[in-house]
Every structure is written in structure tokens, then in C-alpha cells.
Image: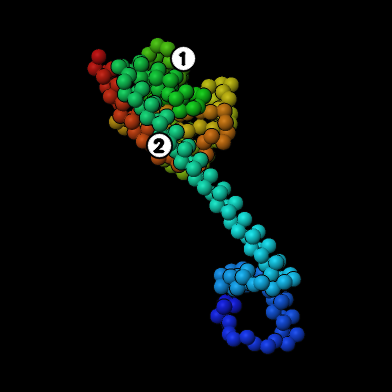
Amino acid sequence: MTSLTEAAAPAIALDTEERDLIRSLILADPELVLSDDMVMRALLGSTAQGARNIVDLRDKLVERLEGRLDKLVHTNRSVIAAAYENVAGTQQMHRAILALIDAPDLGEFLRRLTRDVPAMVGVEDARLGLEAEVDAIGPAALAEGLAGRVLLMPYGSIDEYLMLDGDTPPGQVMLRGCGEEAEIIFGEMTRTRSEALLRLDMAGSAGLLAFGTRDPDRFSPDQGTDLLTFFSGVVERLLTRHLAEADDA
């Protein structure tokens, strides 16, 4: 579209009908003027007295600029909040990883992973599932003080749980809301309403680290998973090493 400035020329005498037409066009679509910087500078620099239309355009311009400013402020606040959240999440994961690395044996590793790490990352519950030759899901007798937080699960049951929402093969990390089906992992009467599921692969044997929270909006599929993917890789390696050492003992 040709801008109003491109049509500018030495003063032209306009009759009443032409003036009315221009006025009606501007009032019908103020963007014709508001989007043209040169026209706005000319209008705002006018010293004409009683020029009501110019005052109207000034008001519209101010409203437009205020709207842009509000949007910019909101965007900046959202970006800053997201940055702080990412930094806080990274620090939480670092503390959790350091605690796991310092665990001297399998029992202490499992206790820290399922009892201490949830508090470090701001969730209420955690469960570790390990597939084995069992007929049903039940507590694993790998160490004392686990209170059923480590489970033995029949082969194939981990992928079945991950695919409860559909037939799409699960990735390494899955974030989702949940309901009564969470009892399969977190036990009866659980109040878990969203979960972060980390699939572990230990020498061909599947494992599952599940974080649960009562907040239904804490975990959802549209959230990023980079930190949890990294964390699952650390847990996978440390758990594989501790299980191997326990077998050799």
C-alpha cells in the first residue's frame, strides 16, 4: 500500500467533498496515519488551534504506545521469571546429583534417591522401579529404610505404564498429569496428580524413576526436559555401578 507520505506534494487545494473523503478514511482506519512516522511527526508538530482531529490522533497514538509498553513489560517479566526458574531448577539438580555421587553404597544411594532427592527438587514423592522376574509389582528388598519406595516390576510393565496415555513409544523423559492410575507406581491412596517419569536403561534392563507431586500443573508435556534428561543419565550410570558392586560383594 502506498503510504500517505509517498503521496505528499506541494499544498493542493481540496474541495469540501475531497476533504470529507480524506477525513472519513482516516477516521475509519486510523492505522493509515498511525503507522506512518512522517505523517505522525507532521501532525504532532502542528500548532493549529482547535484542531480536534489532531488531538484525537494524539490520544490514539498514546493509547497505542501504552499498549506496546504494557506488552513489552509483560514479556520482559515472563522472560526474567523463566530465567530465574531455570537457574533455580539447575541448582536443585546440581545439589541432588552431588548427594547421589557421594553415596558410599547401593543402600545409601537408593535412600538418597527416593527419600532425600524429592525434597531437593521440590516434589512430594519418588519411586524407583526395576524390572525383574516377578509376577506382580512389589517392594524390593535391596536395602533397609526404603519403605516401599523401590519396586520390582514384571518385564514390560514399565513401558506399559509409560504408554497409558496412548500408543506412542515413550521417550527417555515423560511429563504428564495423572489420576488414579498413579497408584500403580506410588501406591494406594496416593495424592499424586502429575508426574515426571524418567526411563532408565541399565545394560538392557529397564528401570523407571518417577517423581510425583500433588500439583496437577507441575508437570505437563509442553515443558522442557533437558535437565531431567541429564539427571536420568546420571542416575542410570550411578545405579548401574552400584548394582554391579552389590552383585560382586
Residue 95 at least partly seen: yes
Give the label on residue 227, or none.
Answer: 2
Q: Position of residue 227 (x, y in %)?
A: 40, 36
Question: How much space separates mark 1 and mark 2, taking CA atoms?
Answer: 27 Å
Residue 11 versus residue 238 in the image, above or below? below
Q: Amino acid at mark 1?
A: Ala
**Residue at screen point 43% across, 20% down:** 116
Q: Nearer the viewer, residue 125 or 80?
A: 80
* Residue matched to label 1: 147
Residue occupying image coordinates x 75% and y 85%? 16
Residue sitting farthest toward the top: 144
**Image position, residue 129 (x, y; %):** 42, 25
Front-most of residues 123 and 243: 123
**Residue 228 appears in view:** no
Label 2 secondary element: helix
Label 2 CA crowd tier, 10 Å (few <14, some 14–19, many 20+):
few
Image quadrant holding the N terminus, namely bottom right
Which type of secondary structure does the marked residue at label 1 adopt? loop
Residue positioned most to the left: 248
Percent position (x, y) of residue 71?
Answer: 58, 52
- Please provide percent x and percent y for residue 50: 74, 71
Residue 206 sits above or below residue 33 on the image: above
Residue located 66% across and 65% down the image: 58
Q: In the image, 32: left or right of 196? A: right
Foreground tag (1 vs 2): 2
- 10 Å crowding of disc 1: few (<14), some (14-19), many (20+): few
x 55%, y 52%: residue: 72
Quarter of the view holding residue 30: bottom right
Residue 45 found in image quarter: bottom right
